[in-house]
């Protein structure tokens, strides 16, 4: 048994001890079960012939992979049958799923069942992202319960499927914790506290430079600074938001997916990509900004989504590197918040 921490808490015991809310334990166990099932599907994708397109597009116009469809069904079934959810929003479904009143509970969950699935056929890290709200007092569960600012979320997290399966989550106002799936016992076990490195960590920038000709000038100037500073930054871009943000949380640096001329709202979805990752970044000591969005620079968590698949730009990472972006906007005459 050498090297095994027999006292490391499992996910369920950790949630119960820290919240004393049985319904939240049920919810997190349902999410954890989904992640275990999706992890198994991802590992067996080649063997089970799950590579390739499903022949359809999802709610936001992206081509669906077969694993997208399967992961979505897994998440919906687990959450709908948990007895604690009332509204479900998935990237893969055009409309919200309203759980019948007789079976519903107080939680509303927005999720991307398989983020980065365009990379699945080449065996690159992918993941699941989720954000959780409580429905308004007296509500039976409607879309309005989830079309709210990120600051109203009570919990957010993601699971990354790679050489290890790691579930990272945080409750509102708390720290971000990482749990690793132990295949020997089939449980997520607490492994580490997630904190952005002191001082900003490694000098890494992460963005899709193929879009650079469409960016505003301050973003272009920021990337040029990263490349040409006396000690140039390292470029790292996976193309799975889960993988890129997970690396940023652990190593430091900055992740950028700005608005541009062809996507003035950016590309990433607010409810199930922007908000959950912004919450984790902020509660790990970082900054999550929209960059220039609708005429001003602000926090991702302050955005009010107009529909369930609404989008917003993303600039998130350590204060050291987000400040460089802000400085470029200042030079262009744009007001920016203090960091």
Image (cartoon, grey):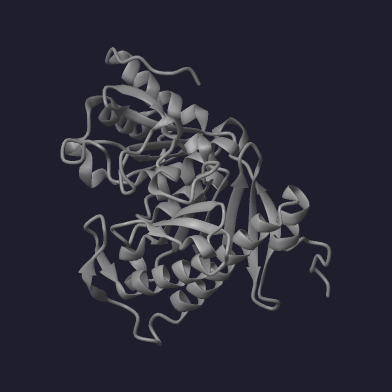
Please say if 273 is above or below 185: above
| Residue for point 44% across, 35% down | 149
Question: In front here: 87 or 201?
Answer: 87
> Image quarter for residue 121?
bottom left
Q: Is residue 38 left or right of residue 250?
A: left
Which residue sits at x=45%, y=78%? Answer: 41
Residue 64 locus on image (x, y percent): 27, 68
Percent position (x, y) of residue 99? 45, 62
**Residue 315 appears anywhere in the view:** yes
Q: Residue at x 32, y 21 (%)?
A: 296
Which x, y percent locates residue 214?
A: 17, 37
Q: Quadrant of residue 181?
A: bottom right
Find residue 87 and report its image quarter. bottom left
Q: Nearer the viewer, residue 173 or 93?
A: 93
Left or right for 93, reference 80: left
Write the residue at 53% across / 70% down.
81
């Amino acid at each position: 048994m050498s090297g095994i921490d027999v006292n490391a808490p499992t996910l369920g015991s950790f949630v119960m001890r820290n919240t004393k809310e049985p319904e939240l334990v049920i919810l997190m166990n349902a999410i954890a079960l989904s992640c275990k099932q999706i992890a198994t599907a991802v590992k067996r994708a080649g063997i089970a012939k799950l590579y390739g397109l499903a022949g359809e597009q999802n709610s936001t116009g992206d081509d669906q992979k077969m694993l997208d469809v399967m992961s979505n069904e897994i998440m919906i079934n687990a959450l709908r049958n948990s007895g604690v959810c009332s509204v479900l929003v998935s990237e893969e479904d055009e409309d919200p799923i309203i759980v019948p009143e007789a079976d519903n509970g107080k939680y509303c969950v927005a999720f991307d069942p398989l983020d980065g699935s365009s990379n699945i056929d080449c065996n690159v890290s992918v993941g699941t992202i989720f954000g959780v709200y409580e429905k308004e007092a007296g509500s039976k569960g409607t879309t309005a319960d989830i079309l709210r600012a990120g600051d109203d979320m009570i919990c957010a997290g993601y699971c990354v499927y790679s050489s290890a399966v790691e579930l990272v989550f945080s409750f509102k106002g708390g720290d971000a914790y990482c749990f690793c799936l132990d295949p020997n016992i089939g449980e997520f076990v607490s492994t580490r506290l997630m904190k952005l490195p002191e001082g900003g960590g490694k000098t890494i920038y992460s963005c899709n430079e193929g879009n650079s000709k469409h960016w505003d000038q301050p973003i272009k100037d920021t990337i040029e600074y990263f490349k040409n500073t006396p000690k140039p930054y390292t470029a790292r871009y996976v193309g799975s938001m889960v993988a890129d943000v997970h690396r940023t949380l652990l190593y430091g640096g900055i992740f950028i997916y700005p608005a541009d001329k062809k996507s003035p709202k950016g590309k990433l979805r607010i409810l199930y990509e922007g908000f959950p990752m912004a919450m984790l970044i902020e509660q790990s000591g970082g900054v999550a900004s929209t960059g220039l969005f609708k005429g001003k620079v602000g926090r991702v968590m302050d955005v009010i989504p107009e529909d369930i698949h609404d989008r917003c730009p993303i600039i998130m990472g350590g204060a050291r590197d987000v400040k460089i972006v802000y400085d470029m906007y200042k030079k262009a005459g744009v007001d920016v918040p203090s960091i």
